[in-house]
């Protein structure tokens, strides 16, 4: 009897802690608007200088960002993808993306070469979860992302730190 009771207690504890562990992953879903960017030189850009919308819903991601530098050159990047997030990994599959980097912002980019398209590639990156924060490096673009409640911080080391605010 004692062994059965211990076994049942152990099973109930495992189920309870397993449920808590599964529930501990904060949701990153929602629609976020790019509200500011701090450049490496300390300059801060606002919503009139750059535009971005980032939506994550039901395993689908839609990302759009664009801006113009002081010389009039443009950067734009749009991506439709699917994703899966666990407490250990973020996996993304590109349905369609297009990047036009006249400025040369992205590492390895050749300014002025025109749009670059991608389809069908899948990548997985490690995830860190600390309290309400979910962090990972975007698999197809270099910024490191930190989701924390209603905010995303995107950091491209030595280039910019972006702040995205949840609008929905």
Image (spheres, rainbow, N blue to C red):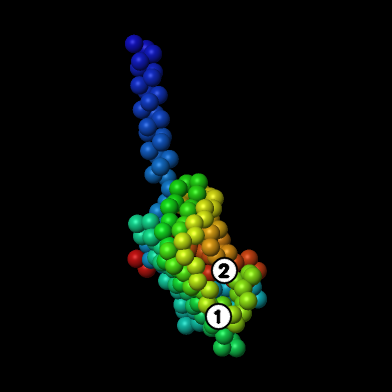
Residue to which mark 1 is pinned: 114
- Local crowd size for mark 2, using a 10 Å CA cut-off: few (<14), some (14–19), many (≥20): some
Measuring 50% from the left and 71% from the top, which residue is drawn there?
A: 117
Left or right for 59, reference 131? left
Identity of the residue furthest to the top in this view: 1
- Local crowd size for mark 1, using a 10 Å CA cut-off: few (<14), some (14–19), many (≥20): few
Q: Nearer the viewer, residue 78 or 132?
A: 78
Percent from the top left, x then y, of residue 40?
64, 73
Local SS, label 1: loop
Q: Quarter-wise, where is residue 64 in the image?
A: bottom left
Percent from the top left, x then y, of residue 91?
48, 53
Image quadrant occupied by the C terminus: bottom left
Measuring 34% from the left and 11% from the top, which residue is drawn there?
A: 1
Q: Is residue 82 above or below residue 109?
A: above
Percent from the top left, x then y, of residue 146?
51, 59
Identity of the residue furthest to the bottom in this view: 71
Label 1 or label 2, whichever comes before in sequence order: 1
Q: Nearer the viewer, residue 160 or 103?
A: 103
| In contact (CB < 8 Å): disc 1 and disc 2 | no
Spatial CA distance of label 1 from label 2 is 25 Å
Q: Is residue 151 visible?
A: no
Q: Any mark on residue 161, and which?
A: 2
Local SS, label 2: strand
């Amino acid at each position: 009897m004692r062994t059965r009771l211990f076994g049942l207690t152990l099973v109930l504890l495992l189920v309870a802690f397993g449920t808590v562990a599964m529930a501990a992953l904060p949701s990153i879903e929602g629609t976020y608007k790019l509200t500011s960017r701090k450049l490496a030189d300390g300059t801060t850009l606002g919503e009139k200088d750059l535009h971005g919308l980032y939506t994550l819903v039901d395993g689908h991601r839609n990302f759009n960002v664009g801006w113009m530098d002081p010389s009039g050159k443009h950067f734009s990047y749009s991506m439709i993808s699917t994703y899966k997030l666990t407490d250990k990994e973020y996996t993304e599959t590109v349905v369609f993306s297009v990047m036009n980097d006249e400025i040369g912002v992205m590492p390895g980019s050749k300014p002025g070469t025109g749009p670059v398209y991608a389809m069908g590639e899948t990548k997985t990156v490690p995830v860190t979860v600390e309290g309400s924060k979910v962090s990972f490096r975007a698999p197809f673009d270099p910024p490191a992302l930190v989701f924390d409640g209603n905010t995303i911080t995107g950091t491209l080391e030595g280039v910019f730190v972006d702040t995205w605010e949840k609008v929905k």
